[in-house]
Amino acid sequence: MKNFLTLLLLSFIVNSFSQQPIIKFIDTKIKIDGKLNEKTWNKLTAYTGFYNYAPTDVGLAKNQTSVKMFHNGEYLFVSLIYNDSTPKTQVSSLKRDTPIGLSDGFAMVLDTQNQQQNAYYFSVNSYSTQIDGIVERVNEGYDFSTSWSTVWKAKAFMNGKQKQYEIAIPLKSLNFNKNNTVFGIQFYVRDIKINSWTILKNVKRNYRLFDLRFTEKFTIEHLPKISPSRFTATPSLTINNQNDVKNNTSNTTYKPSLDVQYNITSSLKFDATINPDFSQIDVDQQVTNFTRFAVNFPERRNFFLENADLFSNLGVSGVNPFYSRRIGSKSPIQFGLKLSGNVSSKTRIGVLNVQTEKENSVQSQNYGAIVAEQQLSKNFTATGFFINRQETAGFEFIDDYNRVAGVNVNYKSDNNKWTGIANFGKSFNDDVSGDNNFYNAGIWFNKRGFSWSAAMKNVGKNYITDVGFTPRLYNFDAVNNIVIREGYTQTTGSVRFEKFYENSKALNSIRYLNYNNNTYFNESGTVSQSSHFLNGALFFKNLSALYYVFKHDYVDLKYGFDPLGNGNALIPGTYNYGILKIGYNSANNQRFRYRFNVQKGNYYTGSRVAAGAYLNYQLLPFANLQFNYDVNKIDLDLLGKETFHLTRFTGEVFFNNRLNWTTYVQYNTQRDNFNVSSRLQWEYKPLSYVYLVVTDNFNKTITRTNWGVAFKMNYRFDF
């Protein structure tokens, strides 16, 4: 009887999706309250039959979900009912744009072009906290950012064991094409109490959670040609007082700014920012860096984020010709203009121009980027780009420039197991030529439990990208205090094997092998470094994990390197060193979560001992407290020894969904910095904010160096 009912349910699900699902046009409006008591909802088809994704990806979910959708030409309306096994609910945050990974809630991904390149992300937790962002393609898969935001409505309603959600997304916020009426849509339901993810379109967990190749195709009935509202403007005013204690100076500035967005069509948007201020964005999370090269940090400024994958994925890891954080890092931005979106169903463009001011010895610069992406076939996508940085004097261009042009080709197989990429780039400069090319080719294979990849890249020493990120080109000689630019070739290989234990009472899976190698060759073809990474892990049923990591490096050091920062540099020569790390991560659905690790090994001519801990206590849903601590003790014998401490405390207090107070305290002895940053954020109207930000900086002996207070207020107008 049980088998018969299972077959009957499967037959119903298959029959439900035998025809392409439709999002109907209904000329009506509803109240977004989560109660779902409008008659319209009763007339719509319910899409159910959600699958398990984690902690198991086998079969249909025990706690099922049903989804209904329609639009009225102005809004896309969505209702979702999750049939929980308990009336209890659990969330980790009431702060907007905190992902639902640690909360009960649901997320939906809208690939409005149905091209599997980028998509919109909308999510709401069981306390009606909204999260929105963009899913974007990276080289071998997909990732998402929550920094993009728009105005939409959402409400959760706890109806006994049923968790009910109701949302309304303005169609004007979406990039769609009237002639392409099929959206790729995926739904994810998170139940943190039992640590589960369930999904509408079946996906195995060897694929990333937001993989756009796995979406259900919905036909949109009577999709409007243009957005009802086409223009938004957000003026703001920032008052910023900065105090330099060391030089005993104080400065107060008043900075008005304006952000504008105009929808040329429903799929092509124009953005402009004038005299922008970014004082309200979160501070970067500090790190300790024991390599010879720079590390990069993510972009957080909203102007650069919509359609960001067009600009940020022009290269590969470690060689990216466009890194938007370069823009405005040394002098303020005067204005920025951006045109981005689809000009046809298979063609996407991005045009960016930003002008910075002259400040002290830093000359004014103009930054430009043009990107065109064309889907050649179901399997191949090509991208061409041109990037320019040029010094300016008023309205004149000075003959001091850097330009980079290139083309990328991405491949994905019909069975979704193979992906590939090929890149070519060329740099043009006013004072150097030759050795200015970049080549790369990579391939990835991925199936449940097993994956491997291989790649090779070559970077010429004059592949200069002033607006990019190519850290390994630049070698700092700590003996002579100079930077030498050298080209290199890199080969990369990886293999991973993991086995899942569905019937075990204790184990969820075992990662038997996770190996990666990066080998670098200098311009003469000699190995300059070979880095090995080996990892294994036990994942228990509650998804806690016990793991090890072993790293080994062979380095043919060509230039002096001062890792301790004490003036005693390692001399050129060959070095072999390695370190073993053992750690444990607790289950992530507890009120108190923790992670810890210990490390011991060699480091160049000496030894290294390290440890790390992460503690998180959730005073649900009113506060969230996090504490990170890492310590590294390095002893290089005659060159000296040093203990580096990195501490970060994050305290979040949630007064409601619109008002929160966040404080960061960071202590980094490697950077000789102790920093306190505290921000009060009030969203008094959707996407209209008041910020009060206090920052205080000290050196590692806790002597104050500078402090500041900033007040910012903006207001969003929709026309």
Image: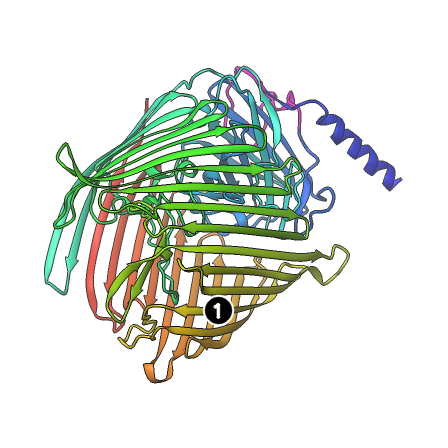
Report the colour scheme.
rainbow
Where residue 253 appears, as percent x and y from the top left, is 14, 46
Q: Name the residue under label 1.
A: 553
Residue range corresponding to the magenta coloring:
24-46
Is residue 420 at all visible to an observer of this figure? yes
In the displayed structure, does residue 309 sit left or right of residue 466? Answer: right
Where residue 329 appears, as percent x and y from the top left, is 25, 48
Where residue 416 appears, as percent x and y from the top left, is 63, 39
Residue toward you, 58 or 494: 494
| Occupied quadrant, residue 703 | bottom left
Q: Name the amino acid type tagged 1.
A: Asp
Where residue 210 appears, as percent x and y from the top left, is 55, 41
**Residue at image point 40% right, 77% down:** 633
In the displayed structure, does residue 262 sit left or right of residue 253? Answer: right
Callout 1 crowding tier (Cα within 10 Å): few <14, some 14–19, many ≥20: many
Q: Is residue 645 above or below residue 110?
A: below
Is residue 129 at all visible to an observer of this figure? no
User: Which quadrant would the C terminus be assigned to in this image?
Assistant: top left
User: Which quadrant would the N terminus be assigned to in this image?
Assistant: top right
| Occupied quadrant, residue 699 | bottom left
Residue toward you, 363 or 390: 390
In the displayed structure, does residue 281 sit left or right of residue 710? Answer: right
Q: In this view, does 103 lie above or below 405?
A: below
Is residue 280 part of the magenta span, yes or no? no
**Residue at image point 46% right, 42% down:** 423
Q: What element carries label 1?
A: strand
